[in-house]
Amino acid sequence: MSPTRTMNRNFLFLWQGQIVSQIGTQLFQVIVILSLKQATESATLVGLLMMASTVPALLLGPVGGAVVDRYSRRSVLITGDLLRGIALTGIAGVLWFGSHSIILLVASLFAYSLLEGSVGAVWQPASMSVVPDLVPKEGLGTANSFIQGSFQICTVVGQAVAGILFRTVGAPLLMLADAVTYFYAAISDSFIRIPALPTKPAEEKKASFKTEIMEGLRHIHAKSGMKMLFYTMAFFQLVMVPMLILFPFYVEDHLHAGPQWYGFLLAASGFGTFLGYGIGGALKVSSRSSSRVTVAMMVVMSLALTSLAFVSGPWIALWLIGTVGAMDGFIVLKLLTTLQLATPSEMRGRVFGLLMTITRGLTPFAMGLTGLIADLTHRNIPAIYLVCGIAATLLASNVAVRRECREFLAGEDGSSQPDVEFAPAPVLLADPHDSTINAPLLCQMDSLEIK
């Protein structure tokens, strides 16, 4: 039976369980880095640890998506939360009783990062695939707005208090607290009733994972608008990474502002993104008008990012970054909702698994290239920002002039998207368990998870 209300029992069980664990995860992201730095004072190990969780997701993403479309998504969510809760309990024990052994500590943290990446490769596509099954189609935009806005709040609050709690409570207890949040999420997920996937014919059940992954690719390529937006999101990620990595240098070397302005600008970005989620969820417009607004925002946001190369005052940069964040939140919400509605339930896992793999696959490459280019240009940050901004503008303009992209965003290409009117939602609306810097990034789709 299809749900008739957005804020129904199943959706609220999913949402409140993930909110609790999201706070714990944000604490963990900070604590694990502080613990490793305190024990080793090695920047190399900290960097390798952050990278360790991305490698399994990159390699297993397509397979994880196929698993999500083959087995019970409720079981995937529960199992993923339980595995991470058990592993974190073990990490807490290591920190408590084995902190004297640096080798044991480092090995345990790296083992958990690999586990987190492997579990996430299955868990994340499941979390993004299940929401459309729990709410009515006309309420999906509101549901996504509610989720992403809530996660944005949890991210800011969790990261803000993590350092204080690390000093006052200690890493072992905080690790144990994060484990408890995962167990709570697993219990909450167990009360969710998710509609069963359509029964597959016997020959399809015997299909290999490779065959099912190729089916996902064919689904993406079958609609030119979906294909164009899919790869545009991935390449937008590529050109945005340098702007994120070099942001501290931009603040100090170009704006000539103190380190506190780095925090102010990130806060402006986070607040703007939160506002964008709220506007996207509350705006009552037709799908065609929403498509036009989204495309226009893509172009304007890219131009605004380009203009950062010419801004010399921190106050102007603050307002510019906040505005970009608001447009970013609206665009990401629209793209997520459109992809969910345009993809059949039995195919969503593979589509989001492939998207996660492509975006995460390009990110490490872009990070390495950023450092090389910065050194070769003697840290000419404005020039790098200008090139990246122009590239982003070209990508956004290409979407704007493509009729198939506009039709896909409006649900006029034969997809199942209705003429959605986003109903007003409370502004209690991310970034789930992702250590990526919270700054404007249109296609940070791997951050659109539900933890």
Image (cartoon, helix red, strand yellow):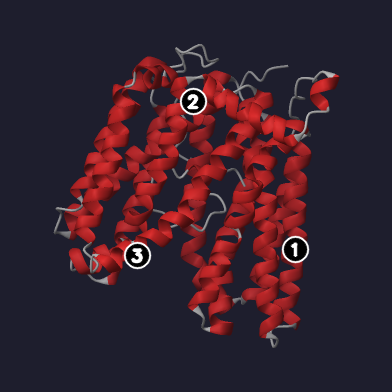
Front tag of 3 and 1: 3
SS at mark 3 in the image? helix
Q: Residue at x 67, y 61 (%)?
A: 114
Where residue 39 appears, as percent x and y from the top left, is: 59, 83
Where residue 30 appears, as percent x and y from the top left, is: 53, 67
Residue 141 vertical position relative to residue 159 in the rendered view, above or below: above
Q: How many marks?
A: 3
The amino acid type found where label 2 is placed reads Thr
In primary-sequence order, the first of circles 1 and 2 is: 1
The amino acid type found where label 3 is placed reads Leu
Question: Position of 70 compared to 54: left or right?
Answer: right
Are the residues flagged by discs 2 and 3 in contact, CB closer than 8 Å? no
How many neighbours does mark 1 have within 10 angstroms: few (below 14), some (14-19), or many (20 or more)? Answer: some
SS at mark 2 in the image? helix
In primary-sequence order, the first of circles 2 and 3 is: 2
In primary-sequence order, the first of circles 3 and 1 is: 1
Residue pointed to by mark 1: 87
Residue pointed to by mark 3: 372
Where residue 23 appears, as percent x and y from the top left, is: 58, 56
Q: Residue at x 55, y 22 (%)?
A: 341
Question: Position of 415 compared to 319: left or right?
Answer: right
Q: Which mark is residue 240?
A: none
The amino acid type found where label 1 is placed reads Ala
Q: Residue at x 60, y 63 (%)?
A: 52
Outermost residue toward the right in this view? 202
Is residue 285 among what the camera can see? no
Tell me how far mark 1 sits from mark 2, CA to CA.
35 Å
Residue pointed to by mark 2: 338
Front tag of 2 and 3: 3
* Camera-nearest residue between 258 and 271: 258
